[in-house]
Amino acid sequence: MANDPILPHLNAAGEVHMVSVSGKDESLRKARAQGRLRAPAYVCQAVKDGVVAKGDVLAVAGSKADGRVDTALPSDTTYGRRSVD
């Protein structure tokens, strides 16, 4: 397993270790997430129709989720995000 180009994060003992990515070029990556809303039918319909009095529930949820990416993905790498759709 040591120096395996497919599994470079594993050392000779098969343990995980840090690998320098400082020489890598920036790359475009996309991620998709999904969730489940459990609420009465009229609430789900209001969210779907975008008519909740306090604003766009799904946009706020997406923004909140995006703010937690760094805690959800265990890594020493920061994830630069350019947009959330």
Image (cartoon, rainbow, N blue to C red):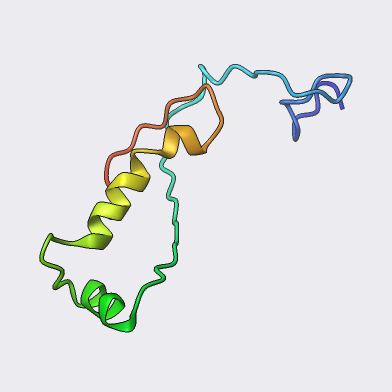
The residue at 44%/62% (across/down) is: 35
Q: Quadrant of the N terminus?
A: top right
Q: Quadrant of the C terminus?
A: bottom left
Instruction: Using the image, determine if residue 46 lies above or below residue 58.
Output: below
Q: Nearer the viewer, residue 48 or 39?
A: 39
| Residue at the extreme front | 40
Q: Nearer the viewer, residue 85 or 5?
A: 85
**Residue 84 in view, yes or no:** no
Q: Would residue 9 appear left or right of 53 to someone viewing this image?
A: right
Q: Quadrant of residue 42?
A: bottom left
x then y, percent, for residue 9: 72, 26
Instruction: Using the image, determine if residue 60 lies above or below residue 80.
Output: below
Q: Would residue 31 appear left or right of 44 to someone viewing this image?
A: right
Q: Quadrant of residue 54?
A: bottom left
The residue at 45%/61% (across/down) is: 34
x then y, percent, for residue 61: 30, 54
Instruction: Using the image, determine if residue 85 lies above or below residue 72.
Output: below
Instruction: Using the image, determine if residue 33 lies above or below residue 80.
Output: below
Q: Nearer the viewer, residue 57 or 42?
A: 42
x then y, percent, for residue 23: 52, 18
Q: Quadrant of residue 43?
A: bottom left
| Residue at the extreme left | 53
x then y, percent, for residue 56: 18, 62
Q: Would residue 84 appear left or right of 69 to someone viewing this image?
A: left
The residue at 21%/76% (across/down) is: 46
